[in-house]
């Protein structure tokens, strides 16, 4: 079943909160992954693996580099997750 943008955002926030040991309420859609949330390259790779596993897809390194905010990650996933 197709995931809604809200469901995707909730999952992304859960994954990031777990990885970075943050309270989900401190993660906003416009939060910058590196500057605001303190994500390093290791955490970024871990996030990538968890999201790929969750949605059964592959995200290229080139695409990952473009994802700067929670909103960017959610918009990207909304575009690539199969529509049916």
Image (cartoon, helix red, strand yellow):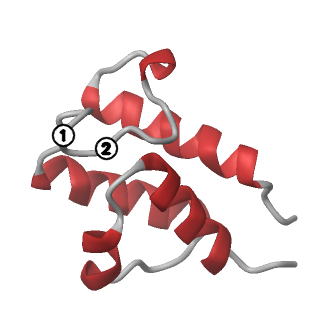
* Label 1 close to label 2 by CB (< 8 Å): yes
What is the x, y in percent for residue 54?
56, 58
What is the x, y in percent for residue 53?
49, 63
Q: Which residue is mark 2?
A: 32
In the rendered image of this protein, does residue 50 appear above or below residue 22? below
| Residue 50, quarter of picture | bottom left
In the rendered image of this protein, does residue 13 appear above or below residue 70? above
In the rendered image of this protein, does residue 48 appear above or below residue 8? below
Q: Residue furthest left?
A: 41
Work out which quarter of the rendered image holds the N terminus and state it.
Answer: bottom right
| Number of numbered discs overlaid on the protein picture | 2
Label 2: element kind: loop
Q: Residue furthest front?
A: 30
Q: In the image, what residue occupies the spot 31% across and 44% down?
A: 32
Q: In the image, what residue occupies the spot 51% across and 45% down?
A: 12
Work out whether residue 35 or residue 24 is closer to the camera in this orientation and state it: 35
Label 1: element kind: loop
Work out whether residue 80 or residue 33 is closer to the camera in this orientation and state it: 33
Q: Which residue is mark 1?
A: 35
Residue 4's disc number: none
Q: In the image, what residue occupies the spot 44% across and 28% down?
A: 27
Q: In the image, what residue occupies the spot 44% across and 40% down?
A: 15
> Left or right: where does residue 67 sit relative to residue 54?
left
What is the x, y in percent for residue 33?
29, 45
Work out which quarter of the rendered image holds the C terminus and state it.
Answer: bottom right
């Amino acid at each position: 079943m197709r995931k809604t943008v809200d469901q995707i955002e909730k999952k992304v926030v859960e994954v990031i909160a777990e990885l970075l040991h943050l309270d989900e309420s401190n993660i906003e859609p416009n939060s910058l992954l590196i500057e605001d949330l303190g994500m390093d390259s290791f955490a970024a790779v871990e996030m990538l693996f968890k999201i790929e596993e969750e949605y059964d897809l592959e995200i290229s390194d080139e695409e990952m580099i473009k994802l700067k905010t929670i909103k960017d990650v959610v918009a990207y996933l909304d575009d690539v997750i199969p529509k049916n």
